Amino acid sequence: MTVVAVLGGPGAPGATSSALALLLSWPLRPGRRVLLVECDPDGGAVLAGALEGRVEAVYGLRNLAVADRRGLLAETLWEQLLDVSPQGTGDRLLLPGLTDPAQAPGLAYTWEPLVEALHALEPQGYDVLLDLGRSGAHGPMAVLPRRADVVAATVRTTLRGLSAARPRIAALREDLDTHGTGSDGLGLLLVTEGPYPENEVSRQFRLPVLGALAHAPRTARVLSDGGDTTDRRFIRSELMRTARTAADRIQDLAATRRRRLGGPQPQPPQQQPPRQQQLPPQVQPVPQVPAPQPVPLFVAGPVGGQPYQPPQPQQPQPQQPYPPQQFQSQQFQPQPQGQFTGEWPVRAEAPQISYAAPAPYIAPPAVPQPPVPAPFPGQTGPEGEEGWHAR
C-alpha cells in the first residue's frame, strides 16, 4: 500500500486537479484499488466540480467525526465512499471532503484514527491519495504528511509560484525530519506553466521532481469543473500522459522508502475475493448492509447506466383502523345511600339549566367632541356672525 499526500500552496497551484489526475491515471494491477480522500480543511471541491453536483452532499469526511466518537470509524468509512471510475468498475474511489470550512475543527481528534484506518487497508491492496489543499500540513492535520509514504508538493514553475512555495517547503522539510520518518519522501509535483526547467527547480529546492504535469487549461478544466473523462482526447492528452509518468515515479519512491524503513513491501494479490469476505474484522461494514454498487458518476453529461440514488428511508406502513367498539347502555340502578359497589353512579336525568335575567345595558361613556374651529377673518359666521359669507 502507498499513501501519498498531495500538498498545495498559495496562488492555487492545482493540488486538487493534480490529485484527480493521479487518481484516474494511477496504474492498478489486477485486484488493486486506489482511494482519494479530500482532506482539505478549506472544503472539498470534487462534488461541485468534477462530479458537477450530481451527488448530494450527504456523503463525506464530516460524517467520520461523529462515527469516531462512537467507535465506528472503520465501518462508517465504507459507507461514505463513491465510485468515480469512468467505467464504474469500483477500483477508483473517492471520499468527499468537507462542505463547510467551519467543520474542520470538529475533526481535530479524528485525523490520527483516520490514518490508522487507511493504513489498515494495506492487506486489501488499496493505495491512498490524500488531498491536503494549501493548509493541510499544519496543526492537527500534520499527522497526515508525517505518516505518508510520499509527500508531493504541487508547485507552478512561475516566479510567483516558486517564491511562495519556498518557505512552506522548507518548513515542511524540517517538520518531517523532526516529527516524521524523514524528508526523503518529500518531492515536487510541477505544473509546467512558467519558463523555469525541471532540473533547475530541483537544484534550487534540493528535492527530487516526482512529476512535471503539462499546463493544459482546457484538459484541466475537466478535472476542476467536470467533463467527459471517457473521451479519447482526454485519456490521451498530454496532461494525463504526464500524470501517469508521475504516478510511476511516486510508486518507485514509495517502494524505496519502504525498503529503507523496513516496512512491508506491497505484494500483488493472488486472487480478489468478494469484498465482504476480504475486509479484515476491524474494517468490516455493518452486518447485513450490502456494499455500494459501482455507478459511473464521473462521466459528464448523461451518466451511463442507472443514476446514483441515495438510500431511501422505508415508508411507514399505514396503520389499521381500530375496530369499532360496541357501547351498550347501562340502566342505572339506584344504590342504597352510604354503600359503594365499585361503580360510579351515572346521572339519569338531564341537568336543570337556569337562565338568568340578562345584564342591564350600560351605555358607553360620552366622548368629548373637539370644539368648532373659529371662522377665517373677513368671513361671516352663521346667523349673521362676523366673518361668514352666504353662498
Image: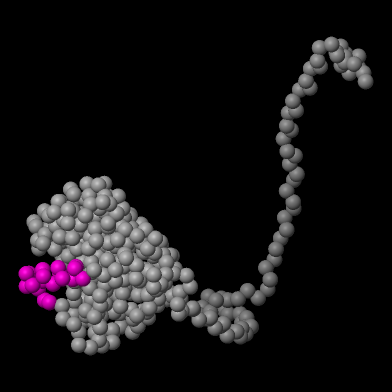
For the residue pair 346 and 207, the one nearer the viewer reads as 207
Q: Dividing the image into 4 quarters, which one contains the C terminus?
A: top right
Q: Which residues are magenta?
A: 248-265
Q: Quadrant of residue 208?
A: bottom left
Q: Quadrant of residue 222?
A: bottom left
Q: Does 264 appear in magenta?
A: yes
**Residue drawn at point x = 31 percent, y = 71 percent:** 24
Q: Looking at this rendering, what residue extends furthest in the right direction?
A: 391
Whether residue 155 can be seen here: yes
Looking at the picture, how far across and down is residue 304, in whole percent? 45, 77
Looking at the picture, how far across and down is residue 197, in whole percent? 21, 55
**Residue drawn at point x = 68 percent, y = 73 percent:** 349
Looking at the picture, how far across and down is residue 378, in whole percent? 84, 11
Asked if residue 132 lies left or right of residue 329, the reply is left
Q: Does 52 appear in magenta?
A: no
Whether residue 7 can be seen here: no
Looking at the picture, how far across and down is residue 62, in whole percent? 32, 63
Q: Is residue 276 above or below residue 45?
A: below
What is the chief secondary structure element of the magenta stretch? helix
Q: Is residue 327 above or below residue 360?
A: below
